[in-house]
Amino acid sequence: MASALRPAVLRLARRLRQMRAHDFDLGTGQLQAMGCLFRNGPMSIGELAQREQVRPPSMTRTVDSLEELGLATRQTSEEDRRRAMVELTDTGRDLVVKDRQRRDAWLTQRVADLTPQERAVLREAIPILEKVTAE
């Protein structure tokens, strides 16, 4: 089963990546960091790096590039001047929303082409896939 599931999941992930917004020609790491900030709100570079499982210097470069594009900002913490909080700009939030809408629309169409029975099986598989991918 694992040998059949792995390529199917990878193909789905690849297709969803292909549907991403290309407004800023962003890399996967940048888009993932933006998605994390969108879901969780402002956080430090260290927290963001930990959630995305990369080293802080790598996340610093990612955040620097997002700042240069006007998609994120970094604000020095009031409590600790050494700590900066990163958050999405309005443009960054709009890009994430647009990106998700595009991918959801593609997936909605693909699911609509399934039979009612296939959709029911897929609906039942969602919590199982979430369990498999939980960390």
Image (cartoon, rainbow, N blue to C red):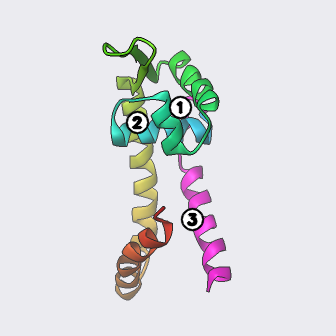
Residue designated by label 3: 12
Q: Position of residue 91 (x, y in %)?
A: 40, 25
Characterize the local packing of mark 3: few (<14), some (14-19) or many (20 or more) Cα atoms within 10 angstroms.
Answer: few
At numbered mark 1, what does the secondary structure look like: helix, strand or loop? loop
Residue designated by label 1: 23
Query: With 132 as the anchor, is 97 left or right in this view?
Result: left
How many marks overall?
Answer: 3
Q: Answer with mark 2 or mark 1, whichever residue precedes in sequence.
A: 1
- The span picked out in magenta is 1-25
- Residues at discs 2 and 1 in contact (Cβ within 8 Å): no
Give me the C-alpha separation between circle 3 and circle 2: 24 Å
Q: Position of residue 65 (x, y in %)?
A: 59, 22
Q: Residue at x 37, y 32 (%)?
A: 94
Residue designated by label 2: 37
Q: Residue at x 46, y 58 (%)?
A: 106
Characterize the local packing of mark 2: few (<14), some (14-19) or many (20 or more) Cα atoms within 10 angstroms.
Answer: many
The amino acid type found where label 3 is placed reads Leu
Choose top left, top right, bottom left or bottom right for residue 44. top left
Give me the C-alpha separation between circle 3 and circle 1: 22 Å
**Quarter of the image with the N terminus in it:** bottom right
Q: Answer with mark 3 or mark 2, whichever residue precedes in sequence.
A: 3
3 vs 2, front mark:
2
The amino acid type found where label 2 is placed reads Leu
Circle on res. 91: none
Q: Position of residue 112 (x, y in %)?
A: 39, 72
Q: Answer with mark 3 or mark 1, whichever residue precedes in sequence.
A: 3
